[in-house]
Image (cartoon, grey):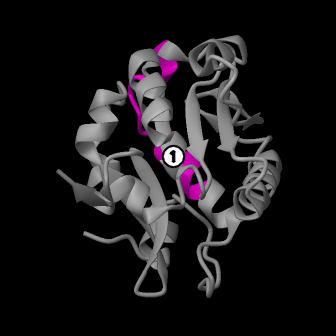
Amino acid sequence: MRITTALLAATGLIAPMARATDGVPPDLEAAILARALAYDRSLSSSAGDEVTIGVISLPEDPASRRQSEAILEAFKELSGRTIQGLPLRAVAVPWDAELDLKDTLVGLEIDALYLTPGLDEQLDAITTAAQELGRGTLTSVEMYVRNGDAALGVVLSGGRPSLLVNLPTAREEGMDLNSAVLKLAEVIR
């Protein structure tokens, strides 16, 4: 079942907002993703003193860089909110093939990964690290979710924001999503 803006507002997942034209606005996307993460029962046991979302981008790709800047700003605007009683923080994680991604994620205490567009060639390494570390993946790229490269995505469906969940990927990444959020999402089984 697809989520509509009105349904999300009625359930408290977001405040009512205007429909997007070029994609889901970053502030709305960040709010939906943060609220969806609140339904991950495994998050509180893996997070430290805060929930940290690492925004992975490809610095040389303009679209990836723009999305990274926009979603980081949107998550920053949510800094007063909590997820499962823990403060929310987002940090930039520029892709660097020379660095060990798992070590970087552990060092930055990343609890979830946001994947920007343009990471197609890096997806295998990112999904492997996410699965090995038990970190959920988030994105605005519908094909990343549909292809199993990300667990949660906020995409436009019929001109409205929709939460898309790839349940097998979410489970492989250690996520334990409450059925309440699954009832509101389009679920890929």
Q: Quadrant of residue 52?
A: top right
> Mark 1 sits on what residue?
121
Magenta part of the chain: 31-45
Q: Quadrant of residue 104?
A: top right
Residue 42 located within the stretch drawn in magenta: yes
In this rendering, position of residue 128 left or right of residue 15: left
Secondary structure state at the residue bearing disc 1: helix
Q: Is residue 86 above or below residue 163?
A: above
> Looking at the picture, how far across and down is residue 77, in whole percent?
82, 51
- Screen quadrant of the N terminus: bottom left
- Give the number of callouts: 1
Q: Nearer the viewer, residue 105 or 182?
A: 105
In this rendering, position of residue 57 left or right of residue 115: right
Q: Going 59% across and 85% down the picture, which residue do you hit? A: 19
> Looking at the picture, how far across and down is residue 130, in whole percent?
46, 27
> Looking at the picture, how far across and down is residue 18, in whole percent?
64, 84
